[in-house]
Image (tube, rainbow, N blue to C red):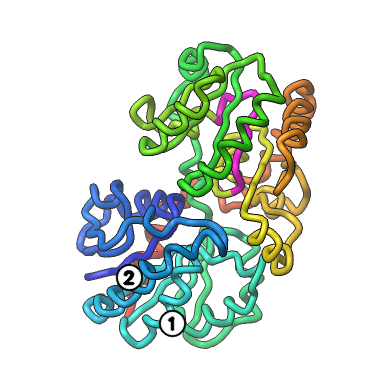
Amino acid sequence: MNVFVSIGERSASNYVYEIFRDVEGIHFTGITDERLEAIGFKSIARIEDLSVVGIVEALPKIPQVLSLWKRIENILPQMDALILCDAPAFNLPLLKRARGKVKKIIYFISPQVWAWKEGRARLISELVDHLVVILPFEVDFYKKYRRDGFRVHFVGHPLVDMAKPSLKEVEVKSFAGSESYIALLPGSRWSEIRRHTPYLKEVLRCLRPQMPILIPTFQNFRAYLTEEFKDYSVKVITQRDMEKPSYNAMAYAELTLLASGTAELEASLLSSPHVVFYRVNPITYFLGRLLVRVRNIALTNLILQKEVVPELVQKSPSELCRVAQDYLRDGGLRSSMREEFKRLRELLGGEGAIHRLRNLLLQLLYEG
């Protein structure tokens, strides 16, 4: 069986890796990364080539994207199935081009159509055979788009199985050189890291933490972050230092400061008290405010239906500094947050999600 996989985010790549790494008899081609290539995926483009946030920030990528869509269109007739993973800015136009060129289309990880541009949900329901969602409330959301030939499936969130530290607390704190430390996650894309780094340096100047800071990241960002934060008590850590650097750093941190995204839900599943921040181009932010239909950006707050995690979007460094100081000074605030996190694993489907997702996706690929 030949399957094309279109992945636009590191988080989705991690899920696909865990789900399909031991699967035999399927030849995968697509937009991937080095980990997927290591288990046999054939890559026609890399995730980092497409990974940008924001309308303004995406403009320079347009010629490259148009060329890639055309190339994929030519490949699809040779495939038995197409799996699209989130990344709606790239995958929804690809979905329109793909219909009629491939026998079966599966969308794994729904775009956040419940947050903005709900019209995309109708497009998905009309052109996709199977939608595999990973957030429980998405099943109810798609009920209004039911039709023959379109099915929505939820069997759990892969992070319930994945978001666990690989090291003991004493090992991580020994690496940090302190009983207490702060974890800092500026983002997973170059665009985010370059945008957030000057902002976070201002936050640290204000915060003046009396404990070291761990920044878990990918190896290709290490030199940049090490140089940028050289004036602070910072250790930049990657897979070369330890397995699962972000999970280990967040799991035992006094407090985690992180950019909005998958890492936020990971922090909650690791029971790490955290504050979410995000900065984008002012034009992108203005347009986003007009389009977004939900109040929260943190998935934890959306799932629990209450504001448990502080969200600082487009806020000043001094505002993030003030909130971080409150949580560092008050252990009760951190304990209350941890209590709220306990409900998440059950709401997200419980343990065994990777196994259930593997079985479901294989069933959908092989069924007539």
- Is 186 on the left-hand or right-hand side of 275? left
* x and y, in percent, of residue 146 in the image: 59, 82
Name the residue at 64% across, 47% down.
278
The residue to which callout 2 is attached is 68
Secondary structure beneath disc 1? helix
Residue closest to the eye, 293 or 60: 60
Mark 2–mark 1 Cα distance, whole angstroms, equals 14 Å
| Label 2 CA crowd tier, 10 Å (few <14, some 14–19, many 20+) | some
Q: Which mark is residue 340?
A: none
Q: Which residue is mark 1?
A: 96
Residue 300, percent from left and from top: 67, 48
Residue drawn at x 52%, y 53% as measured from the top left? 157
Observer able to see residue 32: yes
Q: Which residues are magenta?
A: 250-260
Q: Earlier in the sequence, mark 2 or mark 1?
A: 2
Q: Would residue 293 be found to the left or right of residue 249 on screen?
A: right
